[in-house]
């Protein structure tokens, strides 16, 4: 039976403390805030994606980050997926009258981030826009194995009156945050690269692992068969050796009896 996102919320909510412990950089300059997270808490979220979502689930990453963000900042307050004046609000906090739009990016290049930030001002007005995306170390050159990924969380005051200026500020602050993380981890910032659809990537990894397992089992079975064949060949060789010895004895007897 397929679970609804409401059913999945408690399991995702349980990942929030680990994510918050993984905060490595927090930079703020109104109206933009950038947070970056790295290591075990992030990998727990990646594990959730790997084990509980699939690429065919439309909006899976969006739902996961909406639940994570909402509980990280507001706890149990507020609601998600709220209809308002014919529009859908990803998050609405009634006691503060705050509306939030959540974006989850794939391959978050500078161009993609720029386009998403600008588009936030063209949508139905909300108080805040949250943008989430992953980075991965080039060639899996992580400074802390087995931690492979970083999560970036950008918060924008969507009611700012200068979208172009704010978008430029978003790009500058993400670059600054990356530089700070790189310095902390002792790696060059240039090896922190955008990640393709992590759900699709984890699906591929899952598929490859399953195929590798099946191939390993086939090889094991083949090796067992080869071992049995080798044992049979060994028995045949022993029998041939015995027959040859008997033939030799018969030839010797015939010689002694003058039969050859």
Image (tube, rainbow, N blue to C red):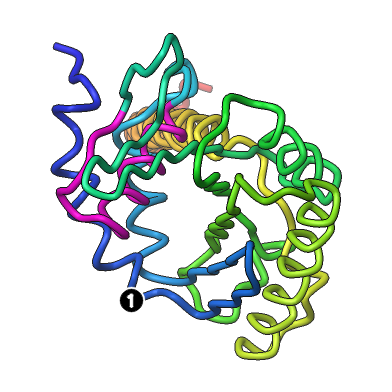
Horizontally, residue 29 falls left or right of residue 233, namely right
Residue 79 position, x and y percent, is 23, 35
121 drawn magenta: no
Q: Secondary structure at mark 1?
A: helix
Residue 175 position, x and y percent, is 78, 70
In the displayed structure, 12 sits above or below 239; it is below
Q: Is 172 in front, or is 241?
A: 172
Residue 254 position, x and y percent, is 43, 27
Q: Quadrant of residue 44?
A: bottom left
Q: Is residue 83 visible?
A: yes
Numbered-mark total: 1
Q: Is residue 247 visible?
A: no
Horizontally, residue 252 falls left or right of residue 161, namely left
Could you tell me which residue is drawn at 27 percent across and 59 percent down?
A: 16
Residue 82 position, x and y percent, is 31, 23
* Circle 1 residue: 21
Tell me which segment is drawn in magenta. 60-80
In the displayed structure, 23 sits above or below 95; it is below
Q: Is 143 in front, or is 175?
A: 175
Horizontally, residue 204 falls left or right of residue 135, namely left
Q: Quadrant of residue 67?
A: top left
Q: Is 161 in front, or is 33?
A: 161
| Secondary structure predominantly adopted by residues drawn in magenta | helix
Q: Is 66 in front, or is 37?
A: 66
Crowding at dot 1, Cα within 10 Å, few <14 / some 14-19 / many 20+, comes out as: some
79 drawn magenta: yes
Could you tell me which residue is drawn at 57 percent across and 31 percent down?
A: 125
Could you tell me which residue is drawn at 72 percent across and 43 percent down?
A: 117
- Quarter of the image that includes the N terminus: top left
């Amino acid at each position: 039976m397929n679970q609804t996102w409401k059913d999945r919320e408690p399991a995702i909510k349980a990942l929030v403390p680990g994510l918050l412990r993984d905060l490595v950089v927090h930079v703020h300059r109104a109206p933009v805030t950038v947070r970056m997270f790295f290591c075990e808490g992030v990998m727990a979220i990646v594990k959730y994606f790997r084990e509980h979502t699939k690429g065919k689930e439309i909006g899976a990453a969006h739902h996961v980050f909406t639940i994570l963000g909402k509980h990280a900042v507001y706890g149990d307050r507020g609601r998600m997926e709220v209809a308002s004046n014919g529009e859908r609000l990803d998050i609405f906090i009634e006691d503060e009258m705050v509306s939030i739009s959540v974006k989850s990016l794939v391959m978050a290049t500078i161009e993609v981030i720029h386009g998403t930030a600008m588009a936030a001002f063209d949508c139905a007005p909300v108080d805040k826009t949250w943008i989430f995306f992953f980075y991965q170390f080039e060639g899996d050159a992580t400074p802390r194995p087995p931690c492979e990924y970083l999560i970036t969380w950008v918060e924008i005051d969507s009611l700012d009156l200068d979208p172009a200026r704010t978008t430029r500020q978003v790009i500058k602050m993400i670059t600054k945050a990356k530089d700070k993380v790189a310095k902390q981890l002792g790696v060059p910032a240039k090896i922190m690269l955008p990640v393709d659809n992590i759900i699709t990537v984890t699906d591929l990894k899952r598929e490859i692992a399953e195929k590798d397992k099946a191939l390993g089992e086939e090889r094991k079975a083949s090796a067992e068969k080869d071992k049995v064949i080798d044992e049979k060949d060994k028995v045949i060789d022993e029998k041939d050796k015995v027959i040859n010895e008997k033939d030799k004895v018969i030839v010797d007897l015939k010689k002694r009896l003058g039969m050859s």
